[in-house]
Image: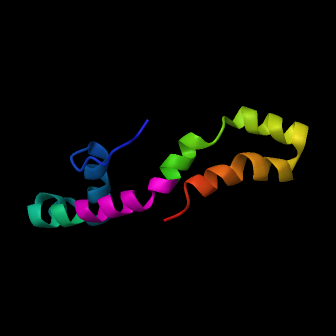
Amino acid sequence: MTQEFNPESSSVWREILSRWGQADYDDLTKRAEHQATLKAEWDSQEYARKRAVAYPKLEDQLDYIYHNGITKWKSDMIKPVKDKHPKG
């Protein structure tokens, strides 16, 4: 599932109010600037969202650790995901 940034979502509205206050939200120019800031932050975390869905379920990871150890878990389950979705 791919998530998209929606500048009109309630979470964006709440974040603007939380960080900059109602006056900045009411000012359309400042609101647009803050939405651009939040969009840049969102874009910078794309790798993290992709990793989150690419990792195996926690239960499968724990089972793999039990049977194969931490070193194999890191090399076989974690590293491939990090390599596929590197930090920006």
Quadrant of the frame with the N terminus: top left
Q: Residue at x 17, y 62 (%)?
A: 32
Highlighted range, magenta: 35-47
86 or 44: nearer the viewer: 86
13 or 71: nearer the viewer: 71
- All told, the count of numbered labels is 0
Chief SS of the magenta region: helix
Placement of 25 over or under 64, stated as above or below: below
Q: Where residue 39 sits in the image (x, y, percent)?
A: 30, 59
Q: Is residue 27 visible to us here?
A: no
1 or 18: nearer the viewer: 1
User: Left of 40 or right of it: where is 44?
Assistant: right
Q: Is residue 38 magenta?
A: yes
Q: Image quarter for residue 54?
A: top right
Q: Image quarter for residue 45?
A: bottom left
User: Left of 51 or right of it: where is 71?
Assistant: right
Placement of 54 over or under 41, stated as above or below: above
Q: Where residue 24 sits in the image (x, y, percent)?
A: 17, 64
19 or 56: nearer the viewer: 56
User: Left of 69 or right of it: where is 33?
Assistant: left
Q: Residue at x 21, y 46 (%)?
A: 8
How is the rendered protein coloured?
rainbow
Q: Residue at x 11, y 66 (%)?
A: 29
Q: Is residue 39 visible to us here?
A: yes
Q: Is residue 23 magenta?
A: no
Q: Where residue 73 sits in the image (x, y, percent)?
A: 79, 47
Q: Where residue 22 sits in the image (x, y, percent)?
A: 19, 59
